[in-house]
Image (cartoon, helix red, strand yellow):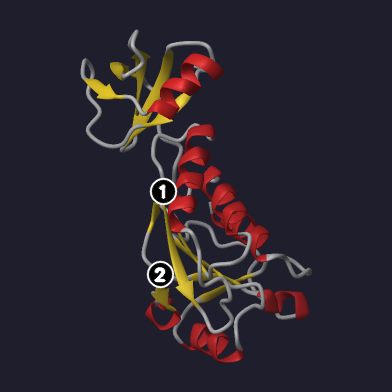
Amino acid sequence: MKNIPRIFIGQNIKTGTMIPADKSVAHYLSHVMRRNDCLVFGDGNEYTATLNDDGRALKIGEKTNHTDPSNDITLYFAPIKRLDDMLNMATQMGVARFVPVITERTVANHTNWDRMKKIVTEAAEQSNRNSVPEISSPIKFAELPFDKLVFADERAAYGRDIPTEYKNAKNILVGPEGGFADNEFDALDKNGAIGLSLGKTILRAELAAPIAISKVI
């Protein structure tokens, strides 16, 4: 259903029910898009919906046959200054969940997580997903699931021979602006994490994430 607005509602959407419409949603449909029909989604499903005459509720219609294009990838990442760009692109690529990781060189320690949740919601709406990725609470580097991890390995740019792709990986780690510290590389290597080459150049952290994702999906 091309060009029909898509709005994230959440879980427990059912045909025939009335769901209160946020004022911003009512304004967007009535005054920006100038229509009262839309698609609503959540929990992997998509439905048709219609804004009622007073703009206060959405009536849920039939479930569509649109399949959720999201994947089951978890992106572990060190918070960075341009985190909104990273999360936006990763959401568009179908990532299921985000886990912030505090590394030795992490400098973005005051992230507005409410704003980040809004960004991934809007990216999910735009990218035809039926679900919005989860953003977990931050963890320490030592808490990573090393033995199930693929990480963006910048050492490839300095001649280290490492894989260029690793299909079907489910856990991906991307480091901070300054890269991983030597002791963090040691921990990744010793605990079974697999380095992934992103090429012969050093990429900005916000670009490294979508490139890494593209190597495994």
Residue topped by disc 1: 133
Q: Which residue is drawn at 47% across and 18% down?
A: 29
What percent of the width, then of the height, locates residue 25?
43, 26
Question: In the image, what residue type sits under mark 2?
Answer: Pro
Q: Which residue is drawn at 76% across and 80% down?
A: 159
What percent of the width, then of the height, locates residue 134?
38, 52
What percent of the width, then of the height, locates residue 161?
69, 78
- Residue nearest the observer in this picture, 85 or 153: 85
Residue 3: tell me if it is visible.
no
Which image quarter: residue 97?
A: bottom left
What percent of the width, then of the height, locates residue 111?
50, 64
Q: What element carries label 2?
A: loop
On the rendered structure, is 78 left or right of 158? left
Which image quarter: residue 12?
A: top left
Q: Residues within 10 Å of mark 2 (few under 14, many from 20)?
A: some
Tell me if label 1 and label 2 are in contact, CB under 8 Å: no
Q: What element carries label 1?
A: loop
Q: Is residue 91 above or below residue 130?
A: below
- Residue nearest the observer in this picture, 159 or 154: 154
Give the foreground label among 1 and 2: 2
Question: In the image, what residue type sits under mark 1?
Answer: Pro
Residue topped by disc 2: 138
On the rendered structure, is 138 left or right of 206? left
- Residue nearest the observer in this picture, 193 or 7: 7
Which image quarter: residue 24?
A: top left
Q: Residue at x 44, y 42 (%)?
A: 70
Between the C-alphas of marks 1 and 2, the distance is 15 Å
Q: Residue at x 53, y 11 (%)?
A: 34
Q: How many numbered badges does the structure rendering display?
A: 2
N-term-proximal mark, 1 vs 2: 1
Residue 79: tell me if it is visible.
yes
Q: Residues within 10 Å of mark 1 (few under 14, many from 20)?
A: many
